[in-house]
Amino acid sequence: MFIINFKNYDNISGSKSLKLAKIATKISRKYKIKIAVCPPQNVLSEVTKTSIPVFAQHVDTAKAGSTTGYIVPELVRKSGASGSLINHSEHRISSKEIKELVSRLKRLNMISVICVRNVDEARRYSKLNPNYIAIEPPELIGTGKAVSKEKPEIITKSVKAVKEAKNSTRLLCGAGIISGDDVSRALELGARGILVASGIVKARNWERAIDEFALSFKNRKV
Ligand code: G3P
């Protein structure tokens, strides 16, 4: 799995999100690998017009109905999204909320990706059996210094922690990944995929950047 978090970068504002999602769709088909995109909430419905899996960047625990300004999983589902990031480093929530959201997304048949900052959190939250745990050391996010090269041990230790939960949860890693080589290293260390933002969104040539990342997946057949 290769997830591109668009964040709220100006590079993907308005119709540019759909453009990036279309390029990701093309590359996903070319190499037959799973790519999912996380556009900002305001363009979520528009991006679901592509055939690529679309995840929300965040969802709230607020109920469907008489609530205002929250991102409600049931409505996100109806917009055509098939999953969500939970507890991203830039949008942390309580463990109670994390637990509730994982079960709620399961009931809705949606993919849950819990983002964690360290091995202890990876161990703790993999017990909830989300589809994915994404380990991202916050200090490397957006730096261009890849977790797979700067902190390889955090990946190997998290892989072990997730395995200990003895369920179907898989480990992704992210932070600072900017090249195919960074991706290959992450996969060699046991990650089952990556979560990336600036390495793609801020690249001068989106197609070339996604192609380079995808090729590393293709070569590893993950
Ligand atoms: O959600 C992905 C993320 O936080 C990593 O960001 O820019 O380091 O790829 P970046």
Image (cartoon, helix red, strand yellow):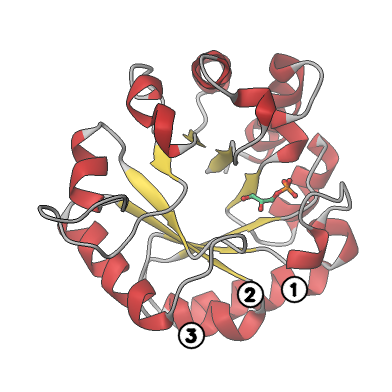
What residue is shown at x 41% (from left), y 23% (from top)? Answer: 47
Q: Position of residue 183 (x, y in %)?
A: 75, 44
| Numbered circle sitting on residue 43 | none
Decide which of 59, 21 is in the foreground and name it.
59
- Mark 2 or 3: in front is 3
Q: Is residue 198 left or right of residue 1?
A: right
Instruction: Tell me whether the residue at label 1 lies in contact with that at label 2, contact meaning CB atoms closer than 8 angstroms.
Output: yes
Which residue in the structure is indicated by mark 2?
Answer: 158
* Residue 218 shows up from this direction: yes
How far, Cα to Cα, is label 1 from label 3?
15 Å
Decide which of 196, 157 is in the foreground and name it.
196
Which residue in the structure is indicated by mark 1?
Answer: 154
Three-letter amino acid code at the position of disc 3: Arg
Determine the secondary structure under disc 1.
Answer: helix
Q: Is mark 1 within 8 Å of ligand 1?
A: no
The crowding category of the residue bearing disc 2, from other C-alpha atoms within 10 Å (few below 14, some 14 to 19, many at least 20), is many
Three-letter amino acid code at the position of disc 2: Ser
What residue is shown at x 46% (from left), y 72% (from top)? Answer: 93
Q: Position of residue 164 (x, y in %)?
A: 49, 84
Determine the secondary structure under disc 3.
Answer: helix
Three-letter amino acid code at the position of disc 1: Ile
What residue is shown at x 77% (from left), y 45% (from top)? Answer: 184
* Residue 109 shows up from this direction: no
User: Sequence order check: which comes first, mark 2 or mark 3?
Assistant: 3
| Numbered circle sitting on residue 124 | 3
User: Sequence order check: which comes first, mark 1 or mark 3?
Assistant: 3
The crowding category of the residue bearing disc 1, from other C-alpha atoms within 10 Å (few below 14, some 14 to 19, many at least 20), is many
Q: Is residue 146 left or right of residue 10?
A: right
Q: Position of residue 197 (x, y in %)?
A: 67, 41
Decide which of 216, 125 is in the foreground and name it.
125
